[in-house]
Amino acid sequence: MSVLAHRSQVLTLYKDLLHHSSKFAAYNFRDYAVRRTRDAFHAAKNETDPAKIEALIHKAEQQLEVVKRQSLISQLYGGEKLVVENPKNQKILRRH
Amino acid sequence: MSLLRFAQGPARMLRNVRPTAQIARSALPRFVVSPAASAFHTSANRMQAAAESQTILTPSLGNQQPPIQSWKSLGFEVTGVETANNTRPIYMDMQATSPTDPRVLDAMLPYMTELYGNPHSRTHSYGWETEKGVDQAREDIAKLIGADAKEIVFTSGATESNNLSIKGVARFYKGKKNHIITTQTEHKCVLDSCRVLSDEGFDVTYLPVAKNGLISMDDLKAAIRPDTALVSIMAVNNEIGVIQPLEEIGALCRSKKIFFHTDAAQAVGKIPIDVTKMNIDLLSISGHKIYGPKGVGALYVRRRPRVRLVPLLTGGGQERGLRSGTVAAPLAVGLGEACRIATEEMAYDHERVKRLSERLINGIQSKVAHVYRNGDDIQTYPGCVNLSFAYVEGESLLMALKDIALSSGSACTSASLEPSYVLRALGAEDDMAHSSIRFGIGRFTTEEEIDFVVQRVTAHVDKLREMSPLWEMVQEGIDISKIEWAQHA
């Protein structure tokens, strides 16, 4: 019962976290935040213990607040792009 | 010596490739044909013939070295890759420092804005709330290394922690115990603290390391004397990443009732460390090596059996009297948060760093021959990859790889062109020590960055080797190590 009851809440959290993670101006932080969010949600997708689910949701909610604040700071101070973000270099890397 | 080396790079290029016109103009007047050129001979016939047809250029000592701008790109560009126009290089120097984790900054910001109280103020809530933050940080640091919060002392960084533990222990037990053991590959701050102590009359033994960078337990056993006060051996080497056998060293030191200090600046948060299991008495931690803020570190000082220290700083008696001065609360909180994250993320980070490290090494070694990794194959932290590119000068490669922030060794000595003393201690030949580059992989490194590095490194190594006479000789089957090089005048 609890798994289903949490389903929409978890999906919303996941979407919000990905959305705000992708707002980091800094390439490395953006990549990490998106990747870590994905990996953490995938690792916990088969969790059935209600207490653990509660704890994970609570943690995700806290992390969402951190990501919201920090992605904003990253946008305020972020500047030049990294050389790997150059679209031409990305094309070369894909071919590579 | 270093000036000569510096100038030999372009000189070597000039006689081997047709440089671009701009370089020839700017660099040529700065070199004169040296009389030493006529003495430049080798046992190989080919080189004798070559000496007749080529003009060998060495720098005139009276002139200044050429300005770096005139050949900063080394006169060639790798085609097909967009160069750094208005873009920042990617960061691959994690052993020098790491980016501050946004979660760490998030924990610090309240203490840099609203919560500005002095953590030692006992009379009002401003002090209490900051003290609470500092105490929580202490808990988090202690948890990461399996210690008790009371055993953690905040310092300004691992350098201070190392100074405090080495000088502190030695000076406290001076008279009864007069001997310190350390290794040749320690960080400069440990070696320098030991040098100061030997000026003060202490005996210091610098243990050699094997070719793989590890100390031998037999050497350590043999070096221990009845008056040995302290053994200081680093956990993870900052240049080559080898992990010393902490548990064995700790057990040996405990059995001989000698204090064991380890500089774990590069190890904490990256490999599991347990001060109880490893019998560590003193352990240095740095904030900015583990995605925390710069300017803060910690020292673990064992309480049972008690380690006694003479403090470096005296004053208000903060931190159990071992380190007077107000604790930098925002930085301490940042270090605590960095340790808390490290405890949670160590397995995830390690798995990823290992994967990226393999991707980097395999990527480079599959495309370029004669690339050797310095340090042990197994007992090494995968996030520190020190590679020697034979027949390529490390400094030239570093300059060519301007899109990648790299170093040939520790940041403290990166201004000098001398080969690293750590690689020398491994018994590396001068040319191999000169051709080494350290790649640092961390929590925020991406696959894309690794692929970029592999692509750039392989392209530039090929290019630099093409213009190297040594490489040409190797291709023709001449054994370089057998050549007798004439001394320069």
Image: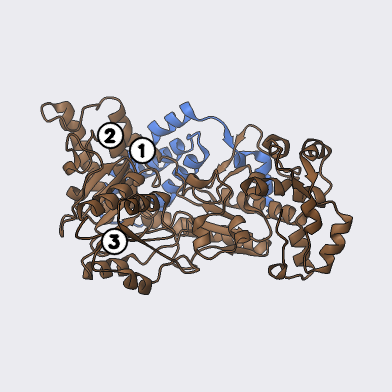
Chain colours: A blue, B brown
Q: Which residue is mark 3?
A: B179
At label 1, the amino acid type is Gly
Of label 1 and label 2, which has the lower sequence position? 1
Say which of A26 and B34 sits in front. B34
- Reading the image, the residue beneath label 2 is B328
Q: Residue at x 50, y 46 (%)?
A: B413
> Mark 1–mark 2 contact, CB under 8 Å?
yes
Q: Residue furthest right?
A: B53
Nearer the camera: disc 2 or disc 3: 3
Q: Is residue B308 left or right of residue B96?
A: left
Q: Is residue A5 visible?
A: no
Determine whether the residue tagged by mark 1 lies in a helix, strand or loop: loop
Q: Which residue is situated farthest in the left direction here? A: B123
State how far apart marks 2 and 3 are (Cα): 34 Å
Q: Which residue is mark 1?
A: B295
* Callout 3: chain: B
Secondary structure under tag 2 reads loop
Residue B199 shows in this picture: yes
CA distance separating discs 1 and 3: 31 Å
- Distance between the alpha carbons at the discs numbered 1 and 2: 9 Å
Q: The numbered mark 2 sits on a residue in which chain? A: B
Residues marked 2 and 3 touching at CB (< 8 Å)? no
Q: Identify the residue at image location x=68%, y=61%.
A: B367
